[in-house]
Image (tube, coloured by chain):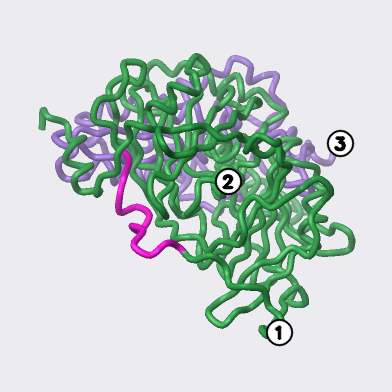
Chain colours: A purple, B green
Amino acid sequence: MRWLGLNLYLVVIDSQTDETGELSAFLADAVPRLERALVARFGVDDGLDAVAEATAYGLANWDRLREMANPVGYLYRVGESQGRRLGRRWRRIDALVAEPMTHDAVVDIDLQRALTRLKAPERVAIVLVYGHGYTYRQAADVLDIPTTTITNHINRGMANLRRLLEQR
Amino acid sequence: MTNTDIERRLTRLGDHLDDARANRLAQPVLKAAGGTAVHTTGSWPQKQARPRTSLAAVTVVLVALATAGGLALALRPPTDAVDTAATDAPSPPAEVPAGAPPPGSIAPFVEAPPTWFGDPVAGERTAGHHRGNWVSTAIGIDDGQGGFQSPIRIGVTDGSLRDLDTAAPTTINGRSLRLLSYGTDWHAVATIDEPTTVVSGAVELDLLVEVLEATRLHETGAGFTVELTTTPDSYTTIVEPQTQAIDPPSRRTFAGATGDIVVNEVSEWVRADLAAAATGADFRPIAIGELTGYTGTAEANPVGPLTFLIWSPRPGVVLEIDTTDTSLQTQQLAELAANTELLPVDQWDRNLEDPAN
């Protein structure tokens, strides 16, 4: 038996399934990236649920996943699909996170509302690159799209974001 | 508005999202720690309870990581709060009992768990909330029956608390402090300079600040200790200054099959009453065989009311049962506690190894 603590989730992995530790290492690397991307996509609540669903899928399909060129990107798309199913309320959500972490932390609700009015791929790309400091290549990798597409999302998204913010 | 302005705001949002993400995942831990982390807005308390059927087979919700130490303030107190005049310093703090096993070297185990516990699951929880050397004391309102209400924990350290590294500075009563709040109930305030003082509890923020203002950190020959020059009205001391044990980064957890009950080793607190006080929740004594444990319930918990039972089976060792199963009676938890033994981690690993492998 091997134990891998992934935040709240305790993933119990049969040692025969993960004899080499490859799966454990993969999850330790993939889950934080999936969390950031899917939170950007669906907000904190549905985003983290989508990560849980994607992780479960990854564990159940590890043999297939391990052969893929970009398993993290594949799981992002799994999570995105699950998140759409989980998050039918998304259209009513106007913030990625609605509350301050500390009393004096500022919730930039104008920015969040503007972000949620962008197309989802633009929002995710912008949050990963500018919010979390990803390179275009890193963002493209986790989203499983070409770097040129990330560039387009960023350029269009930032222009739209600026327009939305200036309208307020 | 320039793109630079927007990029700066996006950077702050990214930090905020990371904090929210960590907090969302840490909430049950915080609740286990004291039933103090109350989420009052948003929809996730309901969402937390949503079944994750596809995940259930492979994951266990780790409902408890540690007592209130799960909250981390990496904050440093003003230098003028440090009394370096060792000559008038109070007595040194109580030491960790000689011969106490280091936290993490042992783990709780129940040979034959009751039916309601289900098949035990080997778990590992993230710990390591306390860095550096810590001395803590606790105060509360004596309920006259051996328990305490509205406890407040006061900790001083030359290190930090991990999860509050990102707590933003704020000014309270003209003093620059770090502050973290969960919901409207639970707060932790901490000084900014080294060494650091952290005061936490599920009480009014003003009361915590009052306690912080009354906290003095004294250097002693071998280290430091903490003193309260005054205590709030109705408050008495629960635990005199106590040196805490090391808090290694991970600990084994004996978990029930459904993940809604766990038995943790939380010996970094050294004493059961200190661990109970650090939860911030009201607690009362309960007999565990010939031992005395402390139990309480956090009512407003994102994953539902969470009941804890904390006891010390031997000097310097502290164990904690946390459960969100409201159908369980405290006496059932006490019986589980009475049947809990301590095993060296290598033996614990062997006992919980999947027999199929």
Q: Residue at x 30, y 49 (%)?
A: B106
| Disc 3: which residue | A168
The residue identified by callout 2 is B68
Q: Main secondary structure of the magenta part?
A: loop
Is A4 placed left or right of B132 in the picture?
Answer: left
Q: Amino acid at mark 1?
A: Ala
Using the rendered image of the protein, determine whether residue B249 is visible from the camera's viewpoint.
yes
Query: Around disc 3, counting alpha carbons within 10 Å, would you say few (fewer than 14), some (14 to 19), or many (20 or more)?
Result: few
- CA gap, disc 3 to disc 1? 58 Å
Amino acid type for the residue under numbered disc 2: Ala
Q: Nearer the viewer, residue A157 or B291?
A: B291
Please state the chain letter of the residue tagged with numbered disc 3 in the rendered image: A
Q: Range of the magenta residues?
A: B96-108
Q: Quadrant of residue B102?
A: bottom left
Q: Amino acid at mark 3?
A: Arg
Instruction: Specify whether B310 is left or right of B241.
Output: left
Q: Secondary structure at mark 2?
A: helix
| Residue A165 at x, y percent in the picture | 80, 40
Q: Residue at x 64, y 72 (%)?
A: B195
Tag 2 subunit:
B
Q: CA distance from mark 2 to mark 3?
A: 42 Å
The residue identified by callout 1 is B85
